[in-house]
Image (cartoon, helix red, strand yellow):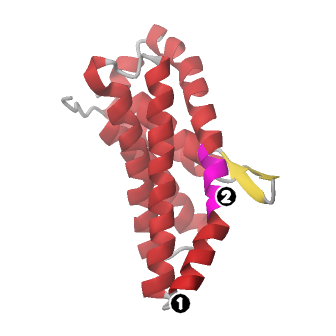
């Protein structure tokens, strides 16, 4: 995949990053956790823009939220950028593999599952590393903390796995008719 950078593509990255950031504000309680659709927007960024550009949109949007509204430090924002970038990147690599150009719904669903699970794994790894090596807690505490965060992470991943392919299926034809889809793709 050859990446072509145009002003339009940079604008699309910025718009999707802004959507990721804004959607993070909208949360609702479910099963003792809070569900938001920011992860779905990250996956959608990958489906619409491909691995690198979609990863940038997902990473920048999530890191922007953490920096401006989440109260996180630079290290946490960087970890967020990397993990959300990886989520969109994995999703897009699968969706665009074999010349599919994210045009096959079944593969897009598989791509979203893989991307969302990548994020859950990275988030759990971050939790473990921070608990053990940054905060200095014993292994048992790190494992309990991971266990307490896992249900909400899986719930958000499941919501993203469902929402992103549906949104992509709804948006793709309109973007294609408007001649914008090829300007977004790698």
| Circle 2 residue | 151
**Position in image of residue 78 (x %, y %):** 40, 66
- The residue at 50%/38% (across/down) is 113
Q: Is residue 2 shown left or right of residue 20?
A: left
Q: Quadrant of the C terminus?
A: top left
Q: Is residue 83 shown left or right of residue 139?
A: left
Q: Residue furthest front?
A: 140
Evaluate whether residue 93 shows in this view.
Answer: yes
Q: Is residue 22 above or below residue 108?
A: below
Instruction: Characterize the magenta stretch by its predominant secondary structure.
Output: helix
Query: Magenta residues, as a range?
Result: 150-157
**Front-lying residue, 107 or 7:** 107
Whether residue 156 appears in magenta in the rendering, the answer is: yes
Q: Upstream in the sequence, badge 2 or badge 1? A: 1
- The residue at 53%/13% (across/down) is 174
**Position in image of residue 46 (x %, y %):** 42, 36
What label sits on residue 137 in the rendered view?
1
């Amino acid at each position: 995949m050859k990446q072509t950078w145009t002003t339009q593509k940079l604008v699309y990255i910025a718009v999707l990053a802004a959507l990721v950031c804004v959607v993070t504000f909208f949360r609702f309680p479910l099963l003792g956790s809070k569900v938001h659709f920011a992860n779905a927007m990250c996956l959608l960024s990958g489906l619409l823009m491909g691995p690198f550009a979609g990863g940038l949109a997902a990473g920048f949007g999530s890191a922007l939220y953490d920096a401006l509204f989440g109260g996180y430090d630079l290290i946490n924002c960087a970890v967020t950028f990397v993990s959300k970038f990886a989520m969109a990147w994995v999703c897009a690599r699968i969706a665009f593999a074999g010349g599919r150009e994210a045009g096959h719904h079944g593969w897009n669903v598989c791509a979203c599952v893989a991307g969302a699970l990548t994020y859950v794994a990275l988030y759990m790894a971050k939790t473990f590393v921070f608990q053990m090596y940054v905060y200095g807690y014993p292994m048992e505490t790190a494992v309990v903390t991971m266990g307490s965060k896992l249900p909400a992470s899986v719930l958000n991943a499941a919501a993203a796995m469902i929402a992103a392919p549906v949104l992509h299926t709804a948006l793709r034809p309109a973007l294609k008719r408007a001649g914008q889809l090829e300007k977004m793709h790698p």
